[in-house]
């Protein structure tokens, strides 16, 4: 059985714990490899390497760091097909979708190449007589990231390129469900010239996470995953004196106004609700149909969803693959049953979905509910599967209230042809990432990614300039040269 080990000091390093967890192909349910479950001995080896690397790496000029990152960008581009296949084979998403996600990660690497410019400080001459002041941003030290299964390349790439560009060393703890891609990304960075130990990968489960959260040699924790774990990470890491950004779950609403272009809205909803089997933190899981557009909207979504091609990633016609595990498939199906029990109208039922030749795969068919109410479990909780709930609202105000009163605040969109409504929505919705006639408003690398409310714990979003701020400490210097000092001691606050 193929083993996926840790990556320490530029080498694949067999784990000392000798404990492994099976990794499955979600299309077939077969075990395809085993991933190491690191223990304290693995962690000790890795942290020593990260600390040593920080001393060397942080002393390299930003320009030299940037040149290695530029090379890394080329190496990823050349390996894009292979990286995407690693994503699809363990996650199950279509190959095109996997390529798109690696490319979105690559854009952060591209952004990080500009680090000499991004680290430029501020300078003020004569803050007092003959006194100058400037601010600089310095790296934190050893930083760490813990990532979810749904974007095994892109989400780690929201973190480590920026952290490393800022001069830190970085420890990645990938999801144990699809860890292969992280190892390849680390290898490519070494091949591009990154000194050993700057980017280490620690495989494992909660035990590995807890070692990262409690060790005082680690300065910051970046996390992306479900809300209960995000909250735990935020509280534990903050209690241990670390800087934390912890991104959680979502329940993204897409509002369709009566004046929307309905074909555009339906196409947008289809990709956003069922793409990647709904396992995206920016997936649309609630369509809010405003006024008399509802019947037509439900009918059109249902017609399209019925003919959606559900197949394994190895089939190039596939539009939607399986969900990640048997456990997750069962959970999604139990949400569908609860929606029926609570009285929502099940228009399309994806339970017990079978594909010939892949009967043991974790497929769930596209599922559509109409007449969902706000007190139902399928509306309140994140399902993270191909299940779309349509909720009907009388008017725009009612739709906006739904968005604003929901516990999550990751992404939202509005489809309308009225600029005034759109402007009101973008100004007044309580959500971090907002789209207008755009179904999945994921910010580009040079903006920053992050939600509000239960979707983000901490002060900083990821990547973009927020990422640079998160991975650096601000230092402000106030300086006067001796010749200009003419007065004796002063005991009052200086005012000029
Ligand atoms: P998860 O929370 O189960 O796991 C995420 C990471 O945390 C993994 O590396 C896992 O090993 C670790 N982990 C799991 N349980 C833990 C525990 N009890 N203590 C410590 N560590 C633990 O999430 P997942 O199922 O891998 O990913 C899906 C979730 O991630 C969804 O809720 C989705 O919305 C969310 N997500 C959010 C964003 C965002 O940007 N807000 C992006 C992608 C995914």
Image (cartoon, rainbow, N blue to C red):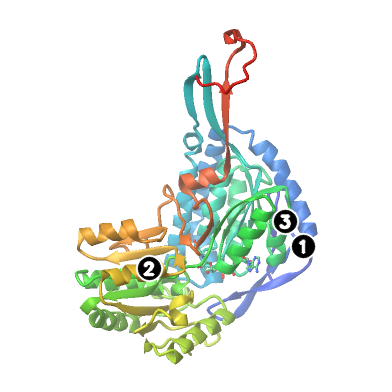
What is the residue that sits farthest to the front in this orientation?
A: 492
The percent coordinates of residue 121 (x first, y second) are 50, 31
What's the distance in space between the residues labelled 3 and 2, CA to CA? 36 Å
- Label 3, secondary structure: give it: helix
Q: Vertically, is 126 above or below 77? A: above
Question: In this image, 358 relative to 12: left or right?
Answer: left
- Dots 3 and 1: beta carbons under 8 Å? no
Q: Nearer the viewer, mark 2 or mark 1?
A: 2
Closer to the N terminus: mark 3 or mark 2?
A: 3
What's the distance in space between the residues labelled 2 and 1, CA to CA? 43 Å
Residue marked by disc 2: 403
Residue marked by disc 3: 214
What's the distance in space between the residues labelled 3 and 1, CA to CA? 14 Å
- Between residues 165 and 486, which one lies in front from this camera angle? 486
Mark identifier at residue 381: none
Residue marked by disc 1: 39
Q: Quadrant of ligand 1?
A: bottom right
């Amino acid at each position: 059985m193929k083993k996926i080990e840790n990556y320490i000091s530029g080498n694949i390093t067999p784990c000392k714990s000798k404990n492994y967890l099976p990794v499955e192909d979600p299309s077939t349910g077969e075990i395809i490899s085993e991933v190491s479950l690191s223990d304290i001995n693995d962690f000790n080896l890795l942290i020593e390497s990260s600390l040593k690397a920080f001393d060397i790496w942080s002393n390299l000029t930003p320009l030299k760091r940037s040149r290695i990152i530029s090379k890394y960008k080329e190496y990823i581009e050349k390996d894009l097909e292979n990286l995407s296949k690693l994503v699809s084979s363990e996650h199950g998403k279509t190959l095109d979708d996997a390529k798109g996600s690696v490319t979105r990660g690559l854009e952060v690497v591209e952004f990080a190449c500009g680090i000499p410019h991004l680290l430029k400080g501020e300078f003020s001459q004569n803050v007092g007589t003959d006194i100058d002041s400037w601010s600089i941003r310095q790296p934190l030290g050893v930083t760490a990231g813990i990532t979810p299964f749904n974007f095994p390349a892109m989400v780690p790439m929201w973190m480590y390129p920026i952290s490393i560009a800022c001069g830190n060393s970085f420890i990645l703890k990938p999801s144990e469900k699809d860890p292969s891609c992280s190892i390849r990304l680390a290898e490519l960075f070494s091949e591009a010239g990154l000194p050993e130990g700057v980017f280490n990968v620690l495989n494992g489960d909660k035990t590995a996470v807890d070692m990262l959260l409690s060790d005082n040699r680690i300065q910051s924790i970046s996390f992306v995953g479900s809300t209960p774990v995000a909250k735990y990470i935020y509280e534990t890491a903050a209690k241990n004196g670390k800087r934390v950004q912890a991104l959680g779950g979502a329940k993204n609403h897409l509002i369709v106004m009566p004046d929307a272009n309905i074909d555009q809205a339906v196409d947008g909803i289809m990709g956003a609700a069922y793409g990647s089997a709904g396992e995206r933190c920016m997936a649309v899981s609630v369509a809010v149909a405003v006024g008399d557009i509802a019947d037509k909207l439900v009918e059109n979504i249902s017609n399209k969803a019925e003919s959606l091609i559900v197949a394994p990633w190895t089939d190039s016609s596939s539009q939607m693959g399986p969900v990640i595990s048997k456990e997750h498939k069962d959970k999604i199906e139990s949400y569908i049953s609860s929606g029926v029990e609570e009285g929502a109208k099940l228009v399309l039922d994806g339970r017990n979905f079978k594909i010939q030749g892949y009967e043991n795969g974790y497929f769930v068919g596209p599922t559509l509910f109409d007449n969902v109410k706000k007190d139902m479990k399928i509306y309140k909780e994140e399902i993270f599967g191909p299940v779309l709930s349509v909720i009907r609202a009388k008017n725009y105000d009612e739709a906006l209230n739904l968005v604003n009163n929901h516990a999550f605040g990751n992404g939202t969109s509005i489809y309308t042809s009225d600029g005034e409504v759109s402007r009101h929505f973008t100004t007044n919705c309580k959500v971090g990432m907002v789209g207008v006639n755009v179904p999945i408003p994921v910010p580009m690398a040079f903006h920053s990614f992050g939600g509000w409310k239960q979707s983000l714990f901490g002060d900083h979003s990821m990547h973009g300039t927020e990422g640079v701020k998160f991975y650096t400490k601000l230092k402000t210097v106030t300086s006067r040269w001796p010749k200009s000092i003419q007065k004796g001691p002063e005991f009052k606050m200086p005012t000029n």
